[in-house]
Image (cartoon, rainbow, N blue to C red):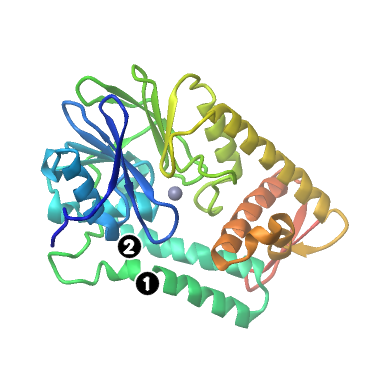
Amino acid sequence: MKLSSIDVRVEEVDENLFRMVIPQPFYEPNNIYLVADDLPMIIDTGYIGSFGYLVSGLKHLGYSLNKIEYALITHNHVDHISGSLLFSVYAKKIKKLGHYGLKKQSDYLIYFHSWIQENERLIDLAFNEEETRQKFKQIIRNRWHTFLQQFDKPVPKKGDRYIDLFRGLKDSDTFSTGKYEWEILETPGHNQWHITPVENKKKWIFTGDLIIGNIPAIYSHSEGSVCDYIDSIGRLRDFKEYQFFPGHGEKMENPERKIKILLKSLSIMEKNLEKRIRDRQVDALELTKEMLGSAAQNEDSLLLGIALTESVLRKLLKEKKIDSTMYYNGYEVFHA
Ligand SMILES: [Zn+2]
């Protein structure tokens, strides 16, 4: 496989820190950062089908996979971790670092099937009509088919379904790559295995998918609650004067303001939902459509919207501000 002949956008974002912009089929391109220290480290690994871009980006920077010591994985979403599932073929020496919970969740295909199931649960929650449900579920299955195929190919292209972390990291853990000392924050909310690495001398913080775009990045209630999300992005406010490097997009301008806006929009959403449920019975689909308006025009954004709506509804339920009735088929109606 000619991995190194692909054109990749690469830039120096600070001294000894480089960003490689790696395309992927589901969302905006991923950032993979290279920390050019004594023990070189990459932060995140991109999508498995985009592995060639990573190899090519490294080559552009004068590195090869076998010069990389560590790959730190911010969380186990497919566009951040699945590139590392090819390490057992192309980069046996790279040591993977990630949330300690991923040691128990090492079989990625098991995790992935539970992710698909979770999406199907969201569909059941929001839609009552069987035909619509089946249609929507089929779209989801087709969407992930290409990814799952990566594991059916014959060796040596075959992805390794096991994550096999070298070290599981928890809050306040530290490690060194030579000149730089790393500290780990556990930051659940977007995903329960999300970590945020910080370098305090350089004042670097790598925020993965905690803050991407202007909508709270909560994808499913089983992966992270809105309460965790509020706590996690709240913690990031302590890092004044730090440079914020996200998992997608450019270095963050004015992160403090961005966090403030996100927290504010979550609290508005909470009040809004509570008000909308006060005098009627309503399901998550209708509430999502009302909240998102034209932003919920395709299946993907609608499903993300339902996940966010559900997460806020669960918070309101927990605080006993609203009530709900769940039907035998998983469909749920919310009321006062
Ligand atoms: Zn993610």
Task: Say which element carries label 2.
Answer: helix
Mark 2, residue position: 109
Q: Earlier in the sequence, mark 2 or mark 1?
A: 2
Residue type beneath disc 1: His
* Residue name at image x 24 percent, y 49 percent: 54
Task: Say which element carries label 1.
Answer: helix
Q: Quadrant of the N terminus?
A: bottom left
Q: Nearer the viewer, residue 21 or 329?
A: 21
Alpha carbon separation for disc pair 2 and 1: 12 Å
Label annotation for residue 145 = 1
Q: Nearer the viewer, residue 46 or 219?
A: 46
- In this rendering, the answer to whether 249 lies above or below 129 is above
Contact check, label 2 and label 1, Cβ < 8 Å: no
Q: Is residue 295 left or right of residue 270?
A: left
* Quadrant in the picture for residue 193: top left
Q: Quadrant of the C terminus?
A: bottom right
